[in-house]
Image (cartoon, rainbow, N blue to C red):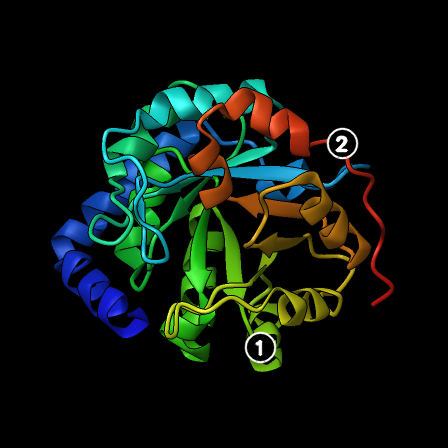
Amino acid sequence: MLGELTAAARIRSHSDTASLAALRRSALARLAANPPASLAAALRRDDVAVIAEAARRSPYAGVIDDAMDVGGVATAAATGGAAALSILTEPSAFGGALADLEMVSRRVRIPLIRKDFVVSTSQVFEAAAAGAAAVVLVARAVGPEAVFTLADAAHGIGLEAFVEVRSEAELGWAIGAEADVICVGAYDLETLDADPVAALQLLARVPGGVPAVYGGAVEHRVDVERAAAAGADAVLVGLGLSAVGRWTEAVRALAGVPRRPRTV
């Protein structure tokens, strides 16, 4: 599954030199006219921040709601106290679109993350032009060299790098690439299995100076409390909130859990 999604992203992201230059100009113009709020800063708070994610579909659950109004969901989640929003732009497995990111950026003021299988600089520029504050880089999908290259491209254009890891080696890549935020994922897109225990153990090793996000298996307040005990600065909540549907109330139910500093 991971290999197929990454290959599809490479096809979608193909750009010639002229197109890349035009994308970069669009990105710089958008950032100059309307600079986004910092994601990393939004996650530095006394309680565990909630990053809400709207998913129409998921490899784990299939179709959730193909007719989902992502803009309405985003507005409701922000009203409920979400610190940031993760906007899926991957079309085949998650039902997302770059247009969703552009539309949400016009409705809310909190930081937006472009969530996709980002494999090229063109996708970084697209994210900036569409209003993102950060881009997701899935370390396992692209490998160590690309994590460095893509994080550097993000920083060069004025975005933050949100690097998702699932192993000690990948954590090392993220630290070396100066990731602005490190997300430890509980789900394995190669097997579709979840391992929350291993994810929380790895999260505890994220350096204290970098916001650490627990990504996966968060549906109830006790899940946020468990992440807080491991030292999470934030939780990424996707499928759980999508299934609930009442986004404002659901985010409020998860917010306000005291954060515990990591000792790393």
Q: Which of 119 and 78 is in front in this view?
A: 78
Disc 1 versus disc 2: nearer the observer: 2
Callout 2 amino acid: Gly
72 to 232, vertically: above or below: above
Which residue is denoted by mark 1 in the rendering?
Answer: 167
- Estimate the x, y position of residue 229 in percent, counting from the top left: 81, 55
Under circle 1, the secondary element is loop
Q: Quadrant of the rendered structure where residue 51 is?
A: top right
Which residue is painted at 47% across and 46% down in the image?
159
Residue density around tag 2, few if under 14, some if 14–19, many if 20 or more, within 10 Å = some
Residue density around tag 1, few if under 14, some if 14–19, many if 20 or more, within 10 Å = some
Image side of residue 47 versus residue 143, left or right: right
The tag earlier along the polypeptide, 1 or 2, is: 1
**Screen quadrant of the C terminus:** bottom right
200 to 226, vertically: above or below: below
Which residue is painted at 83% across and 39% down in the image?
258
Under circle 2, the secondary element is loop
Callout 1 amino acid: Ser
Q: Which of 206 and 31 is in front in this view?
A: 206
Residue 180 visible to the viewer = no
Which residue is painted at 50% across and 32% down in the image?
36
Residue 171 visible to the viewer = yes
Q: Quadrant of the rendered structure where residue 170 is?
A: bottom right
- Estimate the x, y position of residue 53 in percent, counting from the top left: 46, 39
Q: Nearer the viewer, residue 181 or 53?
A: 53
So how many labels did they put on this image?
2
Numbered label attached to residue 55? none
Mark 1–mark 2 Cα distance, whole angstroms, equals 29 Å
Image side of residue 177 versus residue 112, left or right: right
**Screen quadrant of the N terminus:** bottom left
Which residue is denoted by mark 2 in the rendering?
Answer: 256
Image side of residue 118 versus residue 186, left or right: left
